Amino acid sequence: MFRSELDRVVNYTVAIFEAKVKADANENLLNYPDRLHAILSNAVMETFEKMRYYPEIDSDNLRKALGKFYGFEKDNFVVSNGSDELIKLIIQSTCYPGDFILTVFPCFAMYKISADILSVSHSSFDITESWRLDPEKFVSFAKKIDKLKVVFLDTPNNPLGIAYPYEDVEYIVKNLQETLIVIDNAYGEYCQIDYLPLLKYPNVIVTRTFSKLGFAGLRCGYAVSSKKNIEYLNRVKPPYNVNIFAQVICAKVLENFELLKQNVETIKTERDRMFEKLRQWYFVLPSQANFLSIIDQRSQSLYDIMRRNGILVKLFKLRNFDLLRITVGEPSNNRVVVSLLANFWEGEVHAHSGD
Ligand SMILES: *Cc1c(COP(=O)(O)O)cnc(C)c1O
């Protein structure tokens, strides 16, 4: 009864166990600042009685808030149930079965998963050994793919944390004019580079999310692009795809964004501080996101030891390297992580000097 291709689809999974320090999913787990806490809990209570109605069908009020926040119009946005849903909407509105999407390797897992589910083919282009994206080679690789419809570029990249230079992304956008370039900017608020000016090119869509800002449980993301591009995404978007709480709270978050800035700053400062510490002992990639990634052959042992100590991080066993992705959180939790990693390193040194 089911499509045979689905036998090969492996969907996204996560490890579930109780952790003292949850650093595995790039959530922002800092407390909401008091004022924001009050504003949002009032909004929840006011929304409570509206639960019996369907929400706004196209999240119009939230789109207006987005328009105001970014200085665009509401019709430049489509709002979705997590930016994960956007990935699917973008593939659905551009690809026939057998068409191709292209990503960098490694990258966020949902591009390939969504393509697989929709019977769309997937190709990927390796990051260089010095952890850079070579834009010229990327473009020539892309040009050889006959039925290429969409390029997904997560920048900052998940799981690497690195952000591609603006000029490199612009080079790709300019040289692949027939291809839709999706700049997945899920960590945009933690990143120094602003890719939004690339929206001047008609083949660019930028996607963002509230998930990495402290609202992962609401499942709310959005895409910004030309009205024409957004119109197509709206044609495939399910009606009422975003629940009423997500719509109301996310609009409030945008209206009060000043109150959230300190949280974002704390994470950035902590990230840079942790980076300086950890790089004494490990190969750590310079991160523009709310996590740090360690590339180490001993990642599995590190993961096990952390887990035994109540710290949950995410382990990636990639084609030619293992990577440990650690979400930056509360300063006290970050210190626990750093000291455990320091101890592990010292233990290792000890073990080796003993033989
Ligand atoms: C977390 C993440 C997303 C998904 O965000 P949701 O809005 O929670 O679906 C998209 N892209 C990247 C690169 C991510 O890391």
Image (cartoon, rainbow, N blue to C red):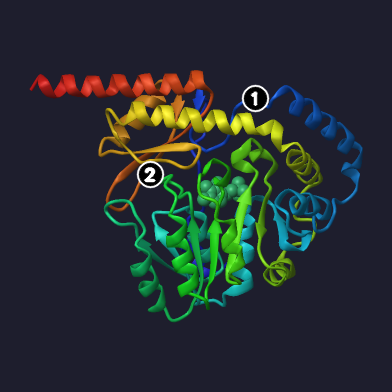
Q: Nearer the viewer, residue 327 or 14?
A: 327
Residue 136, percent from left and from top: 35, 69
Residue occupying image coordinates x 86% and y 31% = 45
Q: Which amino acid does label 2 sit on?
A: Phe
Check the image and report above or below for 178 versus 217: below
Count how many numbered circles sit on residues in the image: 2
Disc on the earlier residue, 2 or 1: 1
Q: Can residue 261 be seen in the rendering of this structure?
A: yes
Question: Residue lying farthest left?
Answer: 355
Element at label 1: loop
Asked if the residue at tag 1 contacts the one at tag 2, i.e. Cβ–Cβ closer than 8 Å, the answer is no
Type of the residue with mark 1: Asn
* Residue 143, x across and y down, in percent: 40, 78
Side of 113 where 348 appears, left or right: left
Q: Which mark is residue 316?
A: 2
Nearer to the camera, 297 or 28: 28
Q: Which of marks 2 and 1 is in front?
A: 1
- Looking at the picture, how far across and down is residue 94, in whole percent? 60, 74
Give the residue pinned by disc 1.
31
Could you say where residue 115 lies in the image, as x and y percent from the top left? 52, 65
